[in-house]
Amino acid sequence: MVINNEQIINLGMLSPNRPAIDLFNTDLQCELMFNVNDLNVFVQTDEPKLLPEQKIIYEIILHSIAAQQGGFFFLDAPGGTGKTLLIAIILAKIHSHVVLPWHLLRPELQQLYWTQCKIIVWDDCTMAHKYLLEALNRTLKNLRGNNRFFSGALLLSPGDFRQTLPVIPCSTYADEINACLKSSPL
Ligand SMILES: Nc1ncnc2c1ncn2[C@@H]1O[C@H](COP(=O)(O)OP(=O)(O)OP(=O)(O)O)[C@@H](O)[C@H]1O
C-alpha cells in the first residue's frame, strides 16, 4: 500500500503483507505512458520550425546523447525564446525512438531507472537551490558507482538567470545569490 508513491511502512504505519511487485509508482507510470505515433507526428511537424540557433543546439544535444558522452548542457536564454519548445522536441525525438522496458516500472527495479537513464532534463534550474543539483550529482555517482560528472548522464538544464532566482523566505539578496547555481562549484 502506498501514499504519494511511498510505501506506508516507510512512513511509520502498518502495512498489509502483500508482495512489493503489486506496487506501482503512478508518477513514473504516467511519465512513461507516451504515444509513440503522436510523438513522431509532433517531431515531424515541429522539427522543421526550429530556427538556426535552436537547430544547432538540437543537433549537438542529440549527438551527445547518441554518443553517450554525458555532460552538463545549460541553455541560458531570455524568456519566450523557445527553450521549452526545443526541449519538448528533443524529448519527443528520444522517446519516439527509445521505448523504455516496462519491467523498469517494478518498484524493486526502479533504482535501475536511475542507474540506466541517459538524459535528465531539469527545466528552470535557475530557480532551484544549488544544493539540489549538487545532491543529484552525488546521488547519481553513488548509485552508479563512478565518479564522473553526474555519473556520465547528460544533464540538460534550460533556465534564465534574468527570471526568478531561488526563493528563500526571509532572506537577503546575498542569500539568494549564494543559493543560486552560479555560486555552485558545478
Ligand atoms: N522556432 C519556433 N517556431 C515557432 N514558434 C516557436 C519557435 N520557438 C518557440 N516558439 C514559440 O514561442 C513561444 C515561447 O517559447 P517557449 O515557451 O519555448 O520559450 P521559453 O524560452 O521556454 O520561455 P520561458 O523561459 O519563459 O519558459 C511558444 O509558444 C513556442 O511554441
Image (cartoon, rainbow, N blue to C red):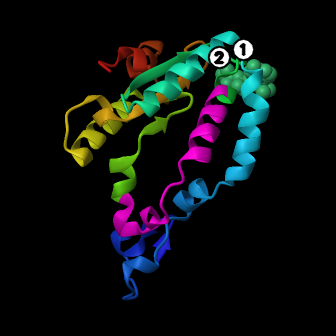
Q: Which residue is mark 1?
A: 51
Query: Where in the figure is residue 83, as x and y percent of width and height?
Result: 64, 23
The three-letter amino acid code for the residue at tag 2 is Gln
Furthest residue toward bottom: 17
Cβ of disc 1 within 8 Å of ligand 1? yes
- Element at badge 1? loop
Main SS, magenta residues: helix
**Residue 129: mark:** none
Question: Residue at point 68% right, 11% down?
Answer: 52
Residue 40 placement: quadrant = top right
Q: Magenta segment, which residues? A: 86-110
Query: Where in the figure is residue 64, as x and y percent of width and height?
Result: 44, 26
Question: Residue at point 38% right, 78% down?
Answer: 20
Residue 20 seen in render: yes
Query: Where in the figure is residue 93, as x and y percent of width and height?
Result: 62, 38
Depth check, front residue: 113 or 168 = 113
Query: Where in the figure is residue 117, as x and y percent of width and height?
Result: 41, 45
In this picture, residue 87 sits left or right of residue 16: right
Image quadrant in which the C terminus is located: top left
Q: Is residue 89 above or below residue 4?
A: above
The reply to whether discs 1 and 2 touch (Cβ–Cβ < 8 Å) is: yes
**Residue 54: mark:** 2
The three-letter amino acid code for the residue at tag 1 is Leu
- Element at badge 2? helix
Residue 9 placement: quadrant = bottom left
Residue 167 seen in render: no
